[in-house]
Image: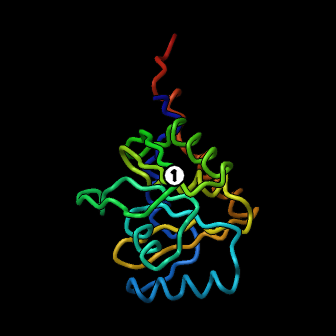
Amino acid sequence: MTMEYNLTPKLRMKFKEPFGVLIEGSFNETMTKMKQLIDKEKPLEIISVGDVVSQNLHEYNIHPQLTIIDNRFLRTQSMPVTASVEKTIKVNNPKGTITKEAILAIKESIERKQHTHIVVEGEEDLLTIIAVIYAPENAYVVYGQPHVGIVIVRVTPEKKLQAQEFLNAMKPLEKLNKKKTV
């Protein structure tokens, strides 16, 4: 496993803010609004990041092309997402990082256009950035905002640029691991 990026303390605070449109409410409220947006805007595809939002989408008969999960709810409770898929990929992605392995799995899954689950050993939250970078324009990347609702990122050139800027602001782990030479 080759790690690529590490979250900085400054960015950690920035990532607590919604990266897209926040839809507040209960499961039924958020899924009803999500369905209305899908019917109105007809996104090219849907990618979900997180166990609760992914499970809720499937239960509401909205099936993302790509689901990125870690089989955990709020990082503690086990919550396997139950939905049939064409392919399941397992990747390592430790907390606060984005690994090359995870980047490649997301990129290839989006290109393949199969209904895929990426199951992360570690943490999936930051992989929203990678999903936005590689998703086609006019797609939705959806993730949960714990205890509040869901966030829908409408993939646009501006959102792709913003996601790339977040990624560029992260510390490449190669720099963190190099010893200083005098």
Left or right of residue 124, residue 112 in this image? right
Q: Nearer the viewer, residue 39 or 139?
A: 39
**Residue annotated with mark 1:** 127
Which colour scheme appears in the figure? rainbow
Relative to residue 173, is residue 160 depicted above or below? below
> Element at badge 1?
helix
Residue at the extreme left of the image, as rendered: 77
Residue drawn where x is 43% and y is 42% of the image: 90
| Percent of width and height locating residue 142 | 53, 68
| Percent of width and height locating residue 110 | 64, 52
Density class for disc 1 (Cα within 10 Å; few <14, some 14-19, many ≥20) is many
| Percent of width and height locating residue 29 | 44, 89
Q: Amino acid at mark 1?
A: Leu
Left or right of residue 132, residue 24 in this image? left
Q: Quadrant of residue 78?
A: bottom left
- The total of numbered circles placed on residues is 1
Left or right of residue 144, residue 105 in this image? right
Relative to residue 107, is residue 136 depicted above or below? below
Residue drawn where x is 38% and y is 41% of the image: 94
Residue drawn where x is 49% and y is 29% of the image: 2
Residue at the extreme top of the image, as rendered: 182
Residue drawn where x is 56% and y is 84% of the image: 35
| Percent of width and height locating residue 18 | 51, 70
Relative to residue 4, is residue 69 depicted above or below? below
Q: Quadrant of residue 64?
A: bottom right
Quadrant housing the N terminus: top left
